[in-house]
Amino acid sequence: MSKLLVTLFLILKNDKIKIYKVLFVLLLLFSFTGTLSAQSDDETALKKVIKLFFKGLQNGDTITLKKAIDDRAILQTASFNKEGESEMRTDDFNKFIKSIASKKPTDVWEERLLSYSIQVDGNMANVWTPYEFYFNSKFSHCGVNSFQLFNDGEQWKIIYLIDTRRRLGCK
């Protein structure tokens, strides 16, 4: 920021540059900074929703899970069967919730997110998260989650989730 101020001071010393040009540059600079801040706020909120989803998943807590995911959400998995053929499975939302509710308290599900790639356009967002999944501290599989989220004006919610699952090519 101090380099910017020095540069602006040097520009102002030049009589050929009008003050309104400098003000225009400052206006652009501050409007860009505001955009970055808003985007950062969205990214923080989106990560919070994803973490809430996994907290509910890991704890078998459907109430927490439902705070993160819309009850009309579409849930899919892209994988390969034992013959190596590509397949896609769509899970029924209610069955998904029942499976989470029936999770044994002694079973530990841990999905380690390796990174976040977030894209936002208005009230729609995509969050791409490579992961490793562990069952009772033992590596199970890896893959990528692709979350589609919608903001209804009050909060972000997951409306679509597709993930990949594989055992080869991890780490």
Image: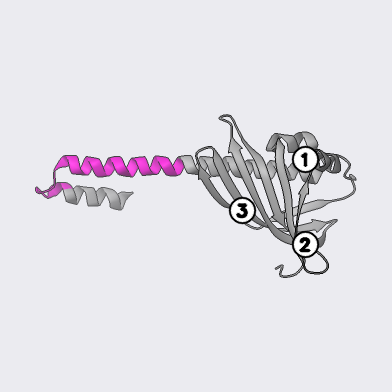
Of mark 3 and mark 2, the one earlier in the sequence is 3
Q: Nearer the viewer, residue 71 or 60?
A: 71
Which SS does the magenta portion mostly show? helix
Of tags 2 and 1, the one toward the viewer is: 1
Of tags 3 and 1, the one toward the viewer is: 1
Task: Give how far apart the Cα atoms at labels 2 and 1 are.
Answer: 22 Å
Residue 26 is situated, as x and y percent measured from the top left of the image, at 28, 42
Label disc, if present, on residue 93 of the rendered structure: 1
Q: Which amino acid type corresponds to the residue marked 1 in the rendered image?
A: Phe
Residue 155 is situated, as x and y percent measured from the top left of the image, at 60, 33
Q: Which secondary structure, mark 2?
A: strand
Q: Residues within 10 Å of mark 3 (few under 14, many from 20)?
A: some
Q: Residues within 10 Å of mark 2 (few under 14, many from 20)?
A: some
- Quick check: can you spot residue 165? no
Residues at marks 2 and 1 touching, judged by CB atoms closer than 8 Å: no
Please give the residue where the numbered disc 3 appears in the rendered image: 128
Location of the C terminus (image quadrant): bottom right
Q: Does the stretch in magenta take in 136?
A: no
Q: Nearer the viewer, residue 7 or 151?
A: 151
Q: Which amino acid type corresponds to the residue marked 3 in the rendered image?
A: Trp
Q: Residues within 10 Å of mark 1 (few under 14, many from 20)?
A: some
Q: Which amino acid type corresponds to the residue marked 2 in the rendered image?
A: His
**Region rendered in magenta:** 12-37
Of mark 3 and mark 1, the one earlier in the sequence is 1
Of mark 2 and mark 1, the one earlier in the sequence is 1
Q: Give the total of numbered labels.
A: 3
